[in-house]
Amino acid sequence: MKVLLVEDNMELAGSISNFLEKEGYLCEVSYTSNEAHDKLISFQYDCVLLDITLPDGNGLELLQFIHLEKIDSCILIISARNSLDDKITGLEGGADDYLTKPFHLTELHARLRAIYRRKKLQGSNIITFNEITLNTDTLEAIVNDIKLDVTPKEFDLLLYFLVNKNRVLSRQSIAAHLWGDYTDNLANFDFVYQHVKNLRKKIHAAEGGDYISTVYGLGYKFNTAVS
């Protein structure tokens, strides 16, 4: 999962970021509303952890921007404001959950996972398409009842394809989703080709369908029409 953390407290941001990265997440941090605004325009995120009180604006304004721009990210507000009115305002404004500070990082993690399952995976940790089954808890990829020997990045890549079936995904967007926003400045994305090639080879070895196709000049697509 790729997460954008919008939090002006550097110590807290560091603690959350380090914890999530140890749990296998990609976590980008913005300390201001303007930084977050720029990242949301330029990159895609599975989830946004959003503080309300920011040095250059209100997190609720960012929430409104996300809603107006139809940015398809799960939103978890993390805030010291714990009044009922604040929670209602955040949830009615489009947030998926509201967690008041201080909180345990394990609870934050549990809420993130619950939001992602509910919004992206139809409420389950199991995602299935034809002969392919992914378990997001155990990071197992099964094709025709055969467990694939995939790397964590290959698992994340296959999950990214399944969540975005029939959508063309550019090499740049795949790189940013799996390796972070810094890849935006790379000269080429040949490493993405290699990961896609390895994943297709492993699915083929288990006699799975060749769903991942190259869209020349654009990127790749998980094509559900393949028989």
Image (cartoon, rainbow, N blue to C red):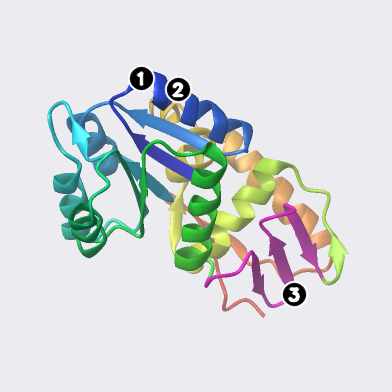
- Which x, y percent locates residue 61? 13, 46
The residue located at (24%, 42%) in the rendering is: 81
Dot label at residue 10: 1
Q: Which mark is residue 14?
A: 2
- Check disc 3 and give the amino acid type: Glu
- The disc, 1 or 3, on the residue closer to the chain's N-terminal end is 1
Per the image, the residue denoted by label 3 is: 131
What residue do we see at 53% from left, 63% from top?
117
Instruction: Rate crowding at label 2 as few (under 14), some (14 to 19) or many (20 or more) other CA atoms within 10 Å.
Output: some
Q: What is the distance, in whole Å, between disc 2 and disc 3 at their CAs? A: 40 Å
Q: Is residue 65 visible?
A: yes
- In the picture, measured across the screen, residue 23 lies left or right of residue 33, that is right
First in sequence: mark 2 or mark 3?
2
Q: Are marks 2 and 3 in contact (CB under 8 Å)?
A: no
x, y percent for residue 209 = 72, 70
- Residue 171 appears anywhere in the view: no
Residue 102: image quadrant is: top left
The verdict on residue 72 being magenta is no
Q: Secondary structure at mark 1?
A: helix
- Spot the residue most to the top: 11
Q: Nearer the viewer, mark 1 or mark 3?
A: 1
Could you tell me residue 17's position as x and y percent?
48, 29
Residue 16 spot, x, y in % from top left: 47, 31
Q: Secondary structure at mark 2?
A: helix
Q: Residue at x 38, y 39 (%)?
A: 4
224 on left or right of 166: right
Alpha carbon of mark 1 to alpha carbon of mark 2: how far? 6 Å
Helix, strand or loop at mark 3: loop
Q: Are the residues at dot 1 and dot 2 in contact (C-beta closer than 8 Å)? A: yes
Q: Quadrant of the C terminus?
A: bottom right
The residues colored magenta run: 122-143
User: Closest to the observer: 146 or 50?
Assistant: 50
